[in-house]
Amino acid sequence: MSAPSAKLPPAAPLLAWYDRHRRVLPFRSQGGPGGGHPNPYQVWLSEVMLQQTTVAAVGPRFDRFLARFPTVEALAAAPEGDVMEEWAGLGYYARARNLHACARLVAGQGGFPRDAAGLRELPGIGAYTAAAVAAIAFGQPVVPVDGNVERVVARLAAEEAPLPGARPRLAALAGGFMEDPAARARPGDFAQALFDLGATICTPRAPACALCPWRGDCAAQQRGLQEELPRKAPKRARPLRHGVHFLLTDSVGQVLLRRRPPRGLLGGMLEVPGTPWRDERWGEAEAQDFAPLPGLSWRRVPGLARHGFTHFELEMVLLAAEIPALLPPDGMEARPLAEAESALPTVMRRLLHLPR
């Protein structure tokens, strides 16, 4: 049953807390009251990187990405393969393809749209990212709603309906913050204050309610429900799929790689050649039909590599062989092993980490 009241607390205490305790992040707006807005390219890039990825992982990768592609025009002009390789290890690789397509559109039209509606029209930009860029980069009076904001609002309102069904109501409640003049005057700072509150105080487990600037206004805390909210509907079990991959190296330490088709799962990324991924386990004999070179003596590497995707779990067997010199077949390439590892997505790196 939902809380009978969903009155929102005033924005001023949260903004005052944020001015004292904001996190220092490479991609963070440091404007403060009356300050300027950050570079929209950097805001957009950071928000895309942070989707399904931790702040700790994004920080150094953000700096490295900017060093290679310092402007949206530089990103637009880069070959897609270079962008995909720079993204390797961050996961959810459709983000990189959409990032590149978006950069080309933005560079072609001379800049980013300034409002959430215009930003939503760009490739790969959904409701959250559009609102985040609009608020933080352009000072538009909108509230971006990510998991942190959902959790904060669910607790403030003691909203007991489970996610994901409760999302529209939580988003509508969060939007009500912009009726407060203090939030409306600093929408970018207010959005980041909500993010920080959820990340550091109103955490999923053991929230630090005694340190919260809104502790006297939180319906969940008053009712002792803060650790129970937001509720979540039970997750469905993910199916298990199986694959066999072939690690072919030569005497100077090069490894044979293949680039995946440009669209679909891990589209455009490099991979260790292998079988398709399917529900049934592969027999080693039938898997040999997918070996990159015929007639070699492949040995089974001990152990299994496992990786979790959004909709399925993957279990992979690795077969290895070595030849004196690699002459890559059409559609494949040879790279030094260290360079290959940095260019491969995480799922493929797990194969390289098996003890050989």
Image (cartoon, rainbow, N blue to C red):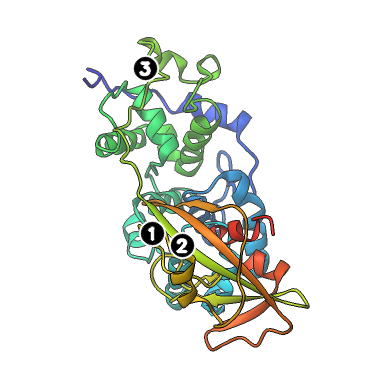
Label at residue 220: 3
Name the residue furthest top: 223
Q: In this view of the protein, can residue 154 be seen by the observer?
A: yes
Structural crowding at the residue carrying mark 3, measured as other residues with C-alpha within 10 Å and reported as few (<14), some (14–19) or many (≥20): many
Disc 3 is placed on an element classified as helix
Q: Amino acid at mark 2?
A: Gly
- The Cα atoms of the two marked residues, 2 and 1, are separated by 32 Å
Label 2 vs label 1, nearer the camera: 2
Residue 330's x, y, as percent?
53, 89
Nearer the N terminus, badge 2 or badge 3? 3
Instruction: Please name whichever residue, 345 or 18, is drawn nearer the observer in this view of the structure.
Output: 345
Q: Is residue 92 left or right of residue 68?
A: left
Secondary-structure class at tag 2: strand
Badge nearest the viewer, 2 or 3: 2
Going from the N terminus, do you reach mark 2 or mark 1 first?
1
Closer to the camera in the image, 60 or 19: 60
Neighbours of disc 2 within 10 Å: few (<14), some (14-19), many (20+): many
- Residue 24 coordinates in the image, percent (x, y): 65, 41
Q: Which mark is residue 218?
A: none
In this rendering, would 53 be left or right of 2?
A: right
Provide the residue designation for mark 2: 243
Query: Where on the picture, by quarter, is residue 267?
Result: bottom left
Q: What quarter of the picture does the N terminus occupy?
A: top left
Rendering coords of residue 146 (x, y %): 41, 42
Judging by the rendered image, the residue that carries numbered circle 1 is 125
